[in-house]
Image (tube, helix red, strand yellow):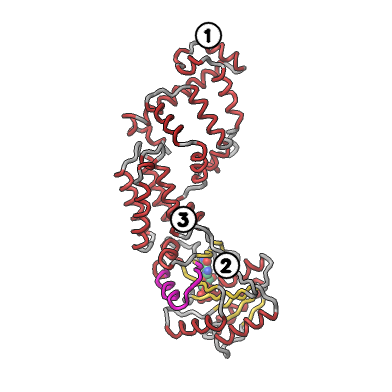
Amino acid sequence: MFSQLQNSFQKVFKDLRGQGKISESNIQEALREVRVALLDADVNIKVVRQFIAQVKEKAMGQDVLQSLTPGQQFIKIVDEELTALMGQTHTKLHLSNTPPTVVMMCGLQGSGKTTTAGKLAASYKKQGRKVMLAGADIYRPAAVEQIRTVAEQVGVDVYAPGTHMSPVDICNEAKRLAEGRQVDLLILDTAGRLHIDDELMQELVQIKESATPDEILFVADAMTGQEAVNVASSFDERLSLSGVILTKMDSDARGGAALSIRAVLGKPIKYIGSGEKLDALEPFHPDRVASRILGMGDMLSLIEKAEGVYDEKSAKQLEQKIRSNEFTLDDFKDQLMQIKKMGSLGSLVKMIPGMGSKMGDMDVDDSQYKPVVAIIDSMTGKERKKPEIINASRRRRIAKGSGRTVQEVNRLLKQFQDMRKMMKQFTGSGAKGKGGKKQQ
Ligand code: GDP
């Protein structure tokens, strides 16, 4: 799902992270690449234009460019805008206060209506609801058979009398039966055509008027991309849809329909179909889909955590110290304590995309903070500011005072010196060097 888009976004972000510093021109370039990625994924051109304009406006803000982590901020903005584009949060089915809730499925032939009706039935049955299916496609005897088979597989009631009754009468009768049988959810599976057809539209409008469904869901084949969006618009004009279900998301659909439908129609995607089996239906969560597209793992939670711990003032002070090479062992200890506030190192590392599985049993636990803090605490104020003065006898004294070994003291001092060197590369003139790659 979305693998092509994922690859494109990964490339954009990798390029951006490779820059030591981020400027307006880097962002412009990244935006251009995002635009191409979205168009390649068959996202509606108007939607792309608006999306880029919105991301641009936010990303060019001074607070982003001057922040410590502009690359991350940019990714966060893209993620937020993608989420907004797809409708922010999951929109559930509207269940009626007076059962049965009537759901009308519509869409072109082959889009997955009958399969999806069965999937919805299975999902609601699992939640303990009484569900009934009705087959209103009287034009194809095979369709009558299909809905009966699906109902049998799911284990729910079905009303599919065959080809001798009109679709409107079938739906009305199904509703009457459902009321009598205390059914919670009645799903009307309507006929489809290969193309939009006025006769069919009229029939659907009549069903809508007489069966007064609580939900009219358009079932769209995600593989058909922009065409799905166009057909959905035509159905919406006539029927005023309440939502969309995108099927065949397990295939190599490029993502264009998923990203455009909400913006073009103003109607939410409620579910996605992710396989032929009757349990392959997922509620559509825009935020999770956005993260999936961006291949971000739980990186956003990590950024949010960091934002919660670092206020702007201390971040600026820290930046200043790093720039002027005044970063001391006291600051180092402060930073360790800040990171500790965010949670255990192990859990933080797992949030980094791709790291969770690689970590295996590697032990990154809180106990690693303690010796470091003890060693720093055993130093004099002068030593913490100027670690260069810590000679062999001082090292022995510090080791004894902290209850650690001289080797541990040596290792910490070495790490601190290395860190300072690295920081120097990040800031000032060394920023464009290979050290820049470390900026995440
Ligand atoms: P209808 O004509 O709109 O009722 O479409 P069907 O329910 O008969 O589905 C048409 C074809 O699409 C069938 O072969 C289904 O198995 C397949 N199909 C439906 N939904 C999905 C899905 O989410 N993923 C995949 N891979 N196939 C699906």
Residue 303 is labelled as none
Question: Which amino acid type corresponds to the residue marked 3 in the rendered image?
Answer: Thr
Label 3 crowd bin: few (<14), some (14–19), many (20+), radius 10 Å: many
Residue pushed farthest left?
Answer: 25
> What residue appears at the point 51 percent right and 22 percent down from the top-left corner?
412
| Residue 410 drawn in magenta | no
Query: Label 1 CB, ligand 1: below 8 Å?
Result: no
Label 2 crowd bin: few (<14), some (14–19), many (20+), radius 10 Å: some
Would you say 42 lies left or right of 136 here?
A: left
Would you say 205 lies left or right of 153 here?
A: left
Q: Quadrant of the C terminus?
A: top left
Residue 83 is labelled as 3
- SS under mark 1: helix
Q: Which residues, given as a range, are shown in magenta?
A: 228-245
Can you say whether 311 is above or below 321 in the image? below
> Of marks 2 and 3, which one's residue comes earlier in the chain?
3
Q: Gap between marks 2 and 1, in whole Å?
A: 73 Å
Give the residue at mark 1: 393
> What residue appears at the point 32 percent right and 34 percent down from the top-left corner?
432
Label 1 crowd bin: few (<14), some (14–19), many (20+), radius 10 Å: few
- Front one among 358 and 30: 30
- Front one among 253 and 206: 206
Give x and y (percent) for residue 306: 50, 39
- SS under mark 2: loop
Can you say whether 31 is above or below 401 in the image? below
Residue pushed farthest bottom?
Answer: 164
| Residue 236 drawn in magenta | yes
> What residue appears at the point 41 percent right and 35 percent down from the top-left corner?
438
Give the residue at mark 2: 93
**Which secondary structure class fits the magenta region best?**
helix
> Of marks 2 and 1, which one's residue comes earlier in the chain?
2
